[in-house]
Image (spheres, rainbow, N blue to C red):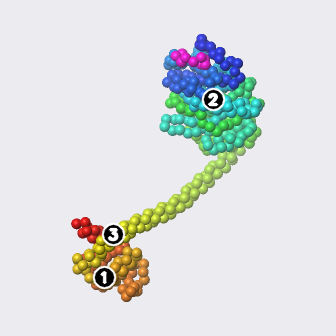
C-alpha cells in the first residue's frame, strides 16, 4: 500500500467533520463526476479518502490533477475488492463521522448538510442516519428502498424494527448513510469474501451489535449509476452472497419467527434467476426437520399466491366489466353530444334564414312540392309542422318510431313508413340518422332538413 504526499491537516480538531470513503477500481470515466459531487457539497467540513484498488486506467493521474487539500489518495498494491478498499479507508479516517460514496455514483449538493444537520439535532444515542437513493440503469430510474418500505421506516425508533426489515432484504444503501465512528467500533469492516450484498451484511451486523440507534430520513439525495461491468449484475455472486447471509444469520431469522417465510420467499419471488446449484445451496441451509416444515410453509405460500392471482384476475374482470360499461356510456354521451351540436347548428341556421325572410316555403315552392311527409317528430319535427301549417301546406303524415299511431292536429301519425302515403316530398328532421333513414325509403324526393337549409343559404349567398 502506498500513500500520496498529500496531507490533510484542516478540520483535524473539528468534531463535526466527515471522513468520506471512496473506493475505486478503473473508474477513470466516472470518478471525476463523483469527486465533483463531493467538492460541491454545501457542507464543507470533510476529508475525501480515495482508495484506489490497483487501477491501471489513469485514475491516479486524474486525481492528482485535482487541487484540493481535502482529498487524500491511497493506492493499494493489488486489486483486492471494494470491501477491502472501504476497510482501508475507514482505518485511515481522521474524523468522528464516516460516509461512503462509490466512484460511479454522486451526491446532491445538500447531502452532507442534511445528514449532519439531522444527526446533530438528534439525541446522543443516535449513531447514524440514512435515506433513499435513485437507482439509474440506462433510461430506467427507481427509488430504493421502495415507497412502501420507506413509509414504514419513518416510524421506526429502535434498531429491532430495522433488523426485522433487513431480514427480508437490504434497506440501507452504502451511499446514503452517515454514521458516527463510535457506532461501528468493534464491529469489524465490510466482509471481503462477499462480491454482492456487502452493504446488507455489514449494516445488518451494525444494527445487531451497536449500542447506537440508526434512524431513517425520507429523502433522496444520492444517485447510483449501475455500470455494465458492475458486480451488481452478477447472478451467480448474488446467490453465493445470499446463501452466506442466510447461513450466517439463521438464528436471527428463527429468533424473529421469519426463517421459513424468508427462505421460501426466495423460491416464490426469484428476483434474480437461480440455477439448480443455487437452489441446492439454499436447501442445504435447512436441516432434516426444517425441510419438512419449509415444504409445508412453501405449499401454503404457493396456495396463497395462487388464491391471490385468482382474486387479482377476478378483480380485473370486474374492472373490465365496469370499464366496458363506462365506455358504452361514454359512447352514448358522445353520440348525444354530436346530435345536440348538429341540432343546435340546424336551429341556428333556421333562425338566420327567417331573419332574412327565407323559409322552408321558399324551397317547396321552387320545387313545386305541395304535399309533404315529416319523418321524425322531435324538436325539429314540431317546428317544421308548425311552419308548414302556418303556410297552409298539406302534411300527409308524420312518421316517428317512438310514437304510437294516432293523430296530431288531425295529421295521421305512423311509427313506420306506410307505402300508401301520397306525398311530393319527405323531409327528414332526424338529421343525424338521415343516411340510414334514406336507404330504407323508396321515394324519389327524400330530403334532410339540414340539407334544405344549407341549400337555402347557398341561394342567399349567390
Give the Cα distance between marks 2 and 3: 74 Å
x then y, percent, for residue 202: 67, 29
Q: Label 1: which residue? A: 391
> Residue visible at 42% across and 78% down?
402
- Is 75 situated left or right of 16 in this image? left
x then y, percent, for residue 217: 66, 37
> Residue visible at 48% across and 64% down?
329
Give the Cα distance between marks 1 and 2: 90 Å
> Residue visible at 71% across and 37% down?
163
- N-term-proximal mark, 1 vs 3: 3
Which of the numbered marks, if any, corresponds to residue 352? Answer: 3
- Secondary structure found at label 2: helix
- Dominant secondary structure, magenta: loop
Mark 2 vs mark 3: give the one in front.
Answer: 3
Q: Label 2: which residue? A: 112
Of 22 and 409, nearer the camera is: 409
Q: What stretch is highlighted in magenta?
A: 64-72
Task: Find residue 436 and report its image quarter.
Answer: bottom left
Q: Is 418 one of the magenta-colored residues?
A: no
x then y, percent, for residue 441: 30, 76
- N-term-proximal mark, 1 vs 2: 2
Q: Is 70 one of the magenta-colored residues?
A: yes
- Is 383 situated left or right of 4 in this image? left
Amino acid at each position: 500500500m502506498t500513500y500520496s504526499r498529500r496531507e490533510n491537516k484542516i478540520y483535524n480538531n473539528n468534531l463535526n467533520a466527515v471522513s468520506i470513503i471512496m473506493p475505486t477500481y478503473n473508474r477513470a470515466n466516472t470518478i471525476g463526476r463523483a469527486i465533483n459531487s463531493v467538492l460541491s457539497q454545501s457542507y464543507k467540513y470533510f476529508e475525501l479518502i480515495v482508495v484506489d484498488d490497483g487501477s491501471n486506467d489513469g485514475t491516479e493521474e486524474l486525481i492528482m490533477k485535482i487541487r484540493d487539500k481535502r482529498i487524500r489518495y491511497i493506492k493499494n498494491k493489488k486489486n483486492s475488492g471494494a470491501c477491502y478498499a472501504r476497510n482501508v479507508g475507514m482505518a485511515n479516517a481522521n474524523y468522528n463521522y464516516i460516509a461512503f460514496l462509490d466512484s460511479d455514483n454522486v451526491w446532491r449538493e445538500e447531502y452532507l448538510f442534511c445528514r449532519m444537520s439531522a444527526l446533530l439535532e438528534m439525541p446522543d444515542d443516535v449513531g447514524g442516519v440514512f435515506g433513499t437513493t435513485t437507482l439509474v440503469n440506462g433510461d430506467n430510474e427507481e427509488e430504493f428502498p421502495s415507497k412502501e418500505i420507506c413509509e414504514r421506516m419513518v416510524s421506526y425508533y429502535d434498531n429491532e424494527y430495522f433488523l426485522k426489515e433487513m431480514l427480508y432484504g437490504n434497506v440501507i444503501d452504502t451511499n446514503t448513510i452517515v454514521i458516527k465512528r463510535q457506532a461501528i467500533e468493534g464491529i469489524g469492516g465490510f466482509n471481503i469474501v462477499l462480491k454482492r450484498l456487502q452493504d446488507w451484511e455489514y449494516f445488518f451486523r451494525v444494527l445487531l451489535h451497536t449500542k447506537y440507534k440508526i434512524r431513517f430520513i425520507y429523502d433522496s439525495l444520492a444517485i447510483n449509476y449501475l455500470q455494465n461491468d458492475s458486480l451488481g449484475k452478477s447472478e451467480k455472486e448474488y446467490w453465493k452472497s445470499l446463501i452466506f447471509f442466510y447461513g450466517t444469520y439463521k438464528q436471527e431469522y428463527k429468533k424473529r419467527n421469519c426463517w421459513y417465510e424468508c427462505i421460501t420467499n426466495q423460491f416464490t419471488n426469484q428476483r434474480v434467476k437461480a440455477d439448480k446449484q443455487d437452489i441446492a445451496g439454499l436447501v442445504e441451509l435447512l436441516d432434516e426437520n426444517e425441510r419438512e416444515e419449509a415444504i409445508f410453509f412453501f405449499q401454503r405460500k404457493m396456495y396463497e399466491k395462487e388464491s391471490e392471482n385468482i382474486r387479482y384476475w377476478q378483480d380485473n374482470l370486474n374492472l373490465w366489466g365496469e370499464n366496458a360499461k363506462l365506455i358504452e356510456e361514454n359512447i352514448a354521451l358522445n353520440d348525444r353530444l354530436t346530435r345536440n351540436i348538429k341540432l343546435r347548428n340546424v336551429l341556428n341556421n333556421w333562425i338566420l334564414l327567417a331573419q332574412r325572410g327565407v323559409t322552408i316555403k321558399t324551397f317547396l315552392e321552387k320545387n313545386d312540392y305541395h304535399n309533404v311527409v315529416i319523418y321524425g317528430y322531435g324538436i325539429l319535427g314540431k317546428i317544421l309542422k308548425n311552419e308548414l301549417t302556418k303556410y297552409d301546406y298539406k302534411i300527409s303524415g308524420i312518421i316517428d318510431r317512438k310514437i304510437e299511431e294516432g293523430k296530431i292536429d288531425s295529421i295521421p301519425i305512423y311509427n313506420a313508413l306506410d307505402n300508401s302515403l301520397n306525398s311530393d316530398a319527405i323531409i327528414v328532421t332526424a338529421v343525424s340518422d338521415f343516411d340510414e333513414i334514406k336507404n330504407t325509403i323508396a321515394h324519389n324526393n327524400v330530403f334532410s332538413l339540414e340539407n334544405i337549409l344549407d341549400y337555402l343559404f347557398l341561394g342567399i349567398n349567390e
